Image: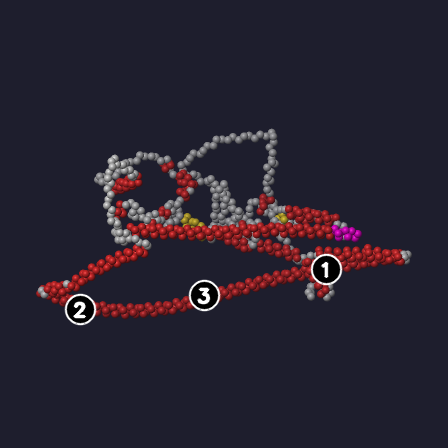
Amino acid sequence: MSHVVTIEEPQAKPDVSQPRCGVKSGAWGHVSSSRMYDFLYDPLFILSSEKDHKQADVQATMIRSKLRKVPRFRAMFSNLIHYPRYSVYWSKADPVPAFVRREWKGQEEKHREALQQLATTDTSFQMPKEVYEDPEVTGRNRYKYFERPFLPFLEQMPLNVVFETTKIEAYTFPPASPDYPPSPSKCTVGTQTAYRDAEVQTDPYSPEYVVCQDSIPELLTLATLTWGRGLPAGQAEVEMIERAREKRAWEATLPPLSDTAQFEKRRRMMNVMERKEWAFREQEIEKLQEIRLEVLKQLLKKRDENQNEVNTKHLNAQWSKLQEAKEAKLAQIQRAHVSAIRKLMAKGKNIEGKLERRNIIKDYSDYASQVYGPLSRLGRFPDNNSEDFVVKNLYLNTYEGLVELESCLPDFVTQPRIRPPKPKVTTTKAGFLKRVARMDHELAEVHKVLLEKKNKVLEPKKPPRFLQRKLIPQPRLPTPTLEMGSNEEEDIEMAVIYLQKLLRGRVVQNMMFEGKEKRLELIQELRMSHALQEDDRLVKKAEKQVTLALQRQRNLHEHKVSLVENHLAGLEGRVLADMFDFLSKELVRLQEERRIHAFAMLAERQRRMREAEESGRRQVEQRRLREEDQIFKEVLKVHQSTVTSYLEDIILNTEENTAEEQARAEIEKVAKEINDIAYEMESRRTQLQSEEIVAELVYSFLIPEVQKNFVKEKDFQSKIPPSLRHSEERSAEARSCSPSGHPQADGSHAQTEFC
């Protein structure tokens, strides 16, 4: 069985980058492609921007759970809600040590690239040398620079060697112990260190070297290629190296500059090589454009696919939403239909609207009534909250838990012993039948009756043996029926019936009142005849005196009660007046407090707005400062390039002037010799020979030379880059605007004055 061991530490050590990591063991493990804090520890983990760095930091913080479970020893094995097994607390431990930098590593790369660009533009700027730490090849890092070679066929077995066959012993199964399985004494755990074990995580070792005098090894020409930037070499780097070799071979075949006779040949070879280089550059540009075009096509295709996928998802979501609404509407209509049908059936059973009392005997005798099986739509849920009593345990829900639980059970559980059942005693000592037995007997009878009703088969009638006369009963009178078209007519009919009942009751009441009015004199005569007796008169008089005495007592009591109520009303009035006064003052105080709170909120809001405005102004100022710094850098770069081009023009002009003076001196010398020879020849030739020589010179030298110079000038102008042409124009303008046209005598940088 495989295991995945997880370690959680509240405080991380310096060589651990994550508080939690998974170790793969067996076939059930899982290896993640990256770890949470690789962007801090792994030197080869590259992020494109500072935004991605912050996003990775936030994801690592959110993924890592800071909640820790602390077991409660008193209720460790409890499954009750009010006695939990553990308590949860918030851990404040930081898995990243304090000495590990959390900033983005790309700032250093940007700074280094900026310095490299400045070194390429400014010749006076010296690039700071990178100080590499000691790799300690012969020390503690020795293992990083060695690897065992993979040579599967290096060791060959000689023909005269025969290995001894291994003896396989029969495997004996260990005896099954009834106790718990022994826990392993060792377990495999994993930690994450600051370095990976693979050799590709370190830069290749570059040993020190010594260059012999008057020798330039070819390997040193590849010093610009570093690990990750050209190394290991690919097809492009190999082609670049081959072109460099061809160029060096071509440079070796060039005539030397000191040989003036082959100067024209050198120029032609350089022109041909330049054309080849420009053609190769155009091919590279075309390849790059084709690659970019393919990438753009793929991006457009991918964007269309993503857009189609998003549209499909939107359509599916809308369709599912409409389907859910449709199903909900159909379910609502179905419920309304069932409710209406149920109401119609209930009204059909009681058309006249009579109130019927509950028949308790019928309800308890019918096992399909509401007593035994209540309906849930009436608000009765017999199995409500039944999931609270469901036991959820690891030992019952998983196969491993069941196996472990089974191993802990004694033998008599897994190997049951069957015992004959004892006969049930259904009577008490006094000989009466027990309640449980009586209930079982009733349930058995009910079950028997239900089975009989369920399995009852109607017996077919036997055909009569003789002809019998079938009496036709007299037809009954038709039962009056009410034809109602809708619920409104039925309601009107019931209202009319109720109104008839009211009218009949009122008629009976009026008849009794009229009879009383008709016999009123007889009723008074009967009363007076009874009052004429002496005893009755005395009794009436005594009752009158008692009534008067009670009236006087009642008046006195009411007077006392009124006095007490007046005093109480006065006290209540004073208390209410004080209370209302206090409430009015409290209301005024509360209003003032709210107004002050509103003023404070307005002041706080104004303060925040001012702070926001100030921060905006500060950001604008910082942005302006950055722009000014960039402008200053660009201006300084322009000045430096102008000075450089100016100095180059001065040097070129000086060289040209010197070459021109030397050429003029040589030409004058050669011309003097040629003139002497020409004068001597001219003294000998005739007029016709002179004219012929002049015509031939003009035709063969002047006209082709002019055409040749014009073609060369045009070709040269087309090959000059625009930037160099602009720099030459600026240098020419600077020379034309400068008062002297020469650099300063002290050797410092020339200050160019723009016109």
702, 741: nearer the viewer: 702
Q: Amino acid at mark 1?
A: Asp
Q: Residue at x 77, y 52 (%)?
A: 264
Query: What is the C-alpha distance between the residues marked 1 and 2?
Result: 141 Å
655 vs 289, left or right, is right
Q: Residue at x 26, y 49 (%)?
A: 478
Against 22, is 634 above or below?
Answer: below
10 Å neighbourhood of mark 3: few (<14), some, or many (≥20)? few
564 vs 668, left or right, is left
Residue 261 within the segment the image draws in magenta: yes
Callout 3: SS? helix
Report the quarter where the C terminus lies: bottom right
Residue 24 within the segment the image draws in magenta: no
- Find residue 12 and report its horizontal and vertical position in percent: 50, 50
The disc, 3 or 2, on the residue closer to the chain's N-terminal end is 2
Foreground mark, 3 or 2?
2
Residue under label 3: 601
- Find residue 19 and report its horizontal and vertical position in percent: 49, 49
The disc, 1 or 3, on the residue closer to the chain's N-terminal end is 3
Examine the image and state in which quarter residue 155 appears.
top right
Q: Residue at x 31, y 50 (%)?
A: 345
Residue segment shown in magenta: 259-270
* Numbered badge on residue 649: 1
* Numbered badge on residue 552: 2
Looking at this view, name the residue that lies furthest to the left.
534
Callout 2: SS? helix
10 Å neighbourhood of mark 2: few (<14), some, or many (≥20)? few
Query: What is the C-alpha distance between the residues marked 3 and 2?
Result: 71 Å
The disc, 1 or 2, on the residue closer to the chain's N-terminal end is 2
* Numbered badge on residue 500: none
Q: Are marks 1 and 2 in contact (CB under 8 Å)?
A: no
Q: Amino acid at mark 3?
A: Met
